[in-house]
Amino acid sequence: MSGTPAPRRGVPGRLLRHPLGLVSALVLGLIVLAVLLAPVLAAQGPGVSELRDSFRGPSGGHPFGFDSAGRDVLSRLLYGGRTTLGGAVLSVVVALTLGVPAGLAAGYYGRWFDGVASWVSDLIMALPAMVVLLASRAVLGSTAWVLMVVLGFLVAPAFFRLVRGIVVQVRGELYVDAARVSGLRDARIISRHVLIVVRGPIIIQIALVAGVAIGLQAGLEFLGIGSGDGAPTWGAMLNEAFQNIQRAPLLLLWPGLALGLSSGALVLLAAALRDVLEDRGGSTDRAVRRTAEAPVAPEPAAGDERAALLSVRGLAVAYTLPDGSDREVVHGVDLDVRPGEVVGLVGESGSGKTQTAFSVLGLLPEGGRVSRGSVLIEGQEVVGLSERRHRALRGDVVAYVPQEPMSNLDPAFTIGAQLVEPIRCKLGLSRKEAAARALELLRMVEIADPERAFRSYPHQISGGMAQRVLIAGAMSCEPRLLIADEPTTALDVRVQAEILALLRRLQRERDLGILLVTHNLGVVADLCDRVAVMREGRIVESGTAEQVLHAPADPYTRGLLDAVLDHVPARPAWRPRKATT
Amino acid sequence: MSTHQPYGSDRSGGRPPGPREPVRPLLEVAGLEVSFAARRRTRTRVLKGVSFDIRPAETFGLVGESGSGKTTIGRAVLGLVPVQAGTITFDGERIERAAPRRRRELSRDLQVIFQDPYTSLNPSFSIGDTLMEPLIAQGTADREARGRVGELLERVRLPADAADRLPREFSGGQRQRVAIARALALRPKLIVCDEPVSALDLTTQHTVLELLLEIQEQTAVSYLFVSHDLSVVRYMSHRVAVIHQGELVETGEADQVTARPEHPYTRALMLSAPVADVHEQRRRRRELAQETGVS
């Protein structure tokens, strides 16, 4: 894998800092080392038997004693590990060579190869592994190695499916398209962009499959249907020990321990690898403290007139970082919305406008909280309000219209069901009454065929219609304040104009107050009476829409307005030129 | 496979009337049709016979709503989607069915800037590696490529040490500059800009557009500029085409199409986009209501 730049610590380094990873890697490393050094460490060959030594206990050069045939247990353990672990390696190698390339090709190219390969993989997975292993032993002979090759073939689909799934996802990424446009060969795209993503999951899978292979092989040997060639394996040793369990129970311990330790270490290593490889964010996954501390008591309003519907004073929002420290993202915001008034909250991404809106709703994401300030909704302080009472306020007095209409509808339920449920819950209506109310709401938001929309699933309606449905849902309990977070950003301009017209009508007919969070100054000009401009968690300027848009006082607002391209002259007509590149 | 067109030949249907210089277009798209497989052996027609051309050092703007097929046009030119019918002629050569090998060579002349600067850069590659990729793919020596990366970063006004950093350390605007630098790496003749600024904030959008104009001024590169935003397209393009449901409904000089459109669809698009002027917006709203019946 050429050029994988990593200004971060490499995987081995991070694995060794992971306690579980360090211990399991160490155990596994020792076992492998001991098995590799068998000729050096073992006192004698695995097959050397001295009948007078049978069942003799541990002695000088033979710490584990002798087995029923008078063979040195340690020597058999060390040599047996070669077959057992070697067999597992063989299975994994076979599974990798079959599964990974097939998965890459099927995922990347799709089409007929994907169809055929997926079918074959499903077929293999449907086969009962034990039965196939027994049958292949009967047909192919009884060497351990042949059985392990068959086992590798049987577990290859695990790699195939894993790799294929990831590659299908990666293939859709724009950076893969960009690489194609850059003139890279498919092979190079796969090796550079795709392998790097599947590498981690494959390594984890290897550890798991190796553990399974050791277990299965030992199981076969234990049942006495493993290799018949007398070569020592841990499973065969277990079998022999089991037959003499009354006479020398300790003989069972050593191969059992070897098997348990190595497959246990593999599983734990896989878990540690998963932690290390899949933690891409860099930060620790230490649980974020759920803070419900009462914020600093709101400062008394000293001769300050506060709006009747929504009044925000000195609002600050802070997030608890994983290391326990706090980061403030909104630093003291004042905002008022009167009944029947549309107030725009304008800013660029990261300005804190959405955080401000979410604090009013009491819906800040995990880790976030109002750290100081006061939010009055119809005169009631909502900062520090219990979740239950806040929930009562949402829907009844305050309602919310989100940015992405589609992702806010559940694809599994009809529009009608999604409207009826909250209405029943909130207003305590019967199913029939609630359905009638939902239809009335759909009519109110100017949906042409309300009955049909009622029966439709979200994927059957357009984005504009979905936004109308969400507005209908928001209006179901006749709220007096609507908080709309970029309600038209995801929509096409013609649909945007319709939604803005709908909001204007609702505001006029129902004296609805609207807090409109947006980055679009055109939307502000279209709908808002007043506007507040936010930057880096502070309001830099506020006033009537006309004041702010036509005579901005703050340089930041002026900069924003200068970036608007409404009145720039069109580009002059093209002229040929003598191009020298 | 290549059929050379005579100088100044006119094979496209979507040209505006008026006198034109006999310059051979850099890119000619004629009768382009693209469809995707839908359920039960049917196909959805995404492009229904699209024709236009782009001259050297020209920006051709393509405006449309979501699902109109505007992005598909760019992807067809780049060879990322198969073409059912019609021709794409680049620099005198038919490329709509170019063989993979030829397609790889074409990437020297034909580049792309995607909309989303967050997914168009591989998150695990450093900026330097991302910029080296097209250079190495076209056989540039390692050492030379490294030098070129420095030039490119300077060109898009990113600090030189950006080469060693990962995309996640950069803002959306900076990432889009990296994407621009990658597109420029091979000194292409045409760059397909697929909504290059719609994921960016207003002020960032402005500086990125300025950068693109400046690059065109210096390198005489042509742009196929795809966007949903009429004002952005107006600012960037010499000529503009409006696409609606897979067909170009209006093509012409930027000022005419974006300020005095003839087609009712274009008029609706123009009037629907709100402007940051309270009085002007009120007037437009009334006009739109008269035109479309939206209250």
Image (cartoon, coloured by chain):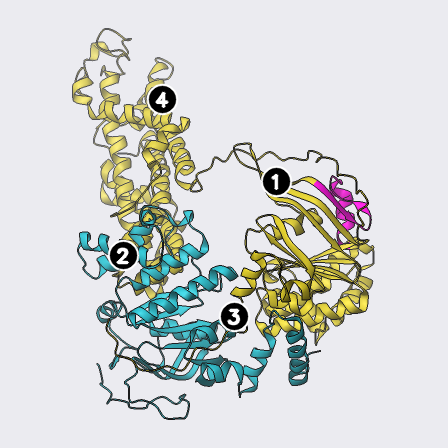
- As drawn, the label of residue B151 is 2
Q: Secondary structure at mark 2?
A: helix
Q: Which residue is identified by label 4?
A: A257
The extreme bottom residue here reads B18
Q: Secondary structure at mark 4?
A: helix
Q: In 3D space, how far apart are the residues under numbered discs 4 and 1 (Cα atoms)?
A: 53 Å
Q: Residue at x 16, y 21 (%)?
A: A39
Q: Are marks 4 and 1 on the same chain?
A: yes
Between circles 2 and 1, the one closer to the viewer is 2
Q: Which residue is identified by label 3?
A: A565
Between circles 4 and 3, the one closer to the viewer is 3
Colour-to-chain, cyan:
B
Residue A12 to residue A26: above or below: below
Q: Residue at x 68, y 75 (%)?
A: B282
| Residue A358 x/y as whole percent | 66, 50
Q: Residue at x 76, y 41 (%)?
A: A385
Colour-to-chain, yellow:
A
- Of the 4 image quadrants, the one containing the C terminus of chain A is bottom left
Q: Secondary structure at mark 3?
A: loop
Q: Amino acid at mark 2?
A: Glu
Q: In 3D space, how far apart are the residues under numbered discs 2 and 3 (Cα atoms)?
A: 30 Å
Q: Which residue is identified by label 1?
A: A318
Between circles 1 and 3, the one closer to the viewer is 3
Q: Are marks 1 and 3 on the same chain?
A: yes
Name the chain under label 2. Answer: B
